[in-house]
Image (cartoon, helix red, strand yellow):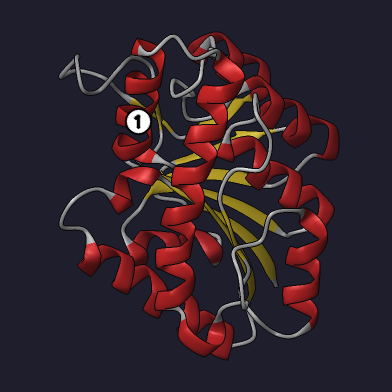
Amino acid sequence: MKAVLKVSGDVFAKNKAERIGAISSMLKEERKKGYTIAVVVGGGPISREYIEIGRGLGLNESKLDLIGIMVTRTNASLLNWALGDAGYYKVVEKPEEAWEAWSEGLIPVAGGMLPGQSTNAVAAVLAEFLQADVFVNATKAGGVYDKNPEVYGDAKLIKEITVPRLRELLKSSYIAGTYELMDQVALNIIERSKINTVIVGHDPAVIRKALYGEVLGTRIIT
């Protein structure tokens, strides 16, 4: 089995070493079982903080995206080094490097790759390029809701959702640092290649269940 896992940048906020370590341990265990996994990590609050500083300095969106990419690669380095011998020798910066890591039986970890492209889009590209059996997007929200669960206490989890309906709910922005659960680029790739995609929380036990088909979140229907 082959999978691409996107890990929310919120995992890399302050005092999250335990969660990073737990995800790393889960990945190493699944690798020993024969599961081939590639990982993409987001920038999270650290990235957003730097982007806002840059915006205050008058930097354009492409430059702000590059700042965000640098932060995602720093986060990726933390997870990559936590993987030890199971990780690739560097943070991967293009799909071909992820393929090379897989060919060596290692776990490739990536951050952002191109300005204007979210890490969700990077993960979707890798899932398509590597022909993954499943794309697991591990987020703080833990799934797609009918409205913002951080604002509305009666928000309901949507267990299955089509790509067109998800586009309506997200109304994604292309401003640096404001990408949602999925952006339009990621959704287009998921749709064109009919990638088996699920959105779940970033608890390692929940991620593991998603890898084996038990979705405690939202499944995207293509």
From the image, which quarter does the N terminus lie in?
bottom right
| Residue 175 image point, x, y percent | 52, 14
Q: Is residue 28 above or below residue 178?
A: below
The residue lying at 34 percent from left, 19 percent from top is 52
The residue lying at 31 percent from left, 73 percent from top is 21
From the image, which quarter does the C terminus lie in?
top right
| Residue 62 image point, x, y percent | 61, 21
Among the 4 quarters of the image, the one containing residue 149: top left
Q: Is residue 82 above or below residue 62?
A: below
- Report the side of 141 relative to 136 (left or right): left
How packed is label 1: few (under 14 Cα within 10 Å), some, or many (20 or more)? some
**Of the residues shown, which amino acid type is indicated by label 1?**
Tyr
Q: Nearer the viewer, residue 200 or 99?
A: 99
Q: Can residue 196 be seen here?
A: yes
**Label 1, on which residue?**
50
Q: Can residue 199 be seen here?
A: no
Among the 4 quarters of the image, the one containing residue 191: top right
Q: Nearer the viewer, residue 219 or 136?
A: 136
The residue lying at 55 percent from left, 12 percent from top is 60
The residue lying at 50 percent from left, 20 percent from top is 176
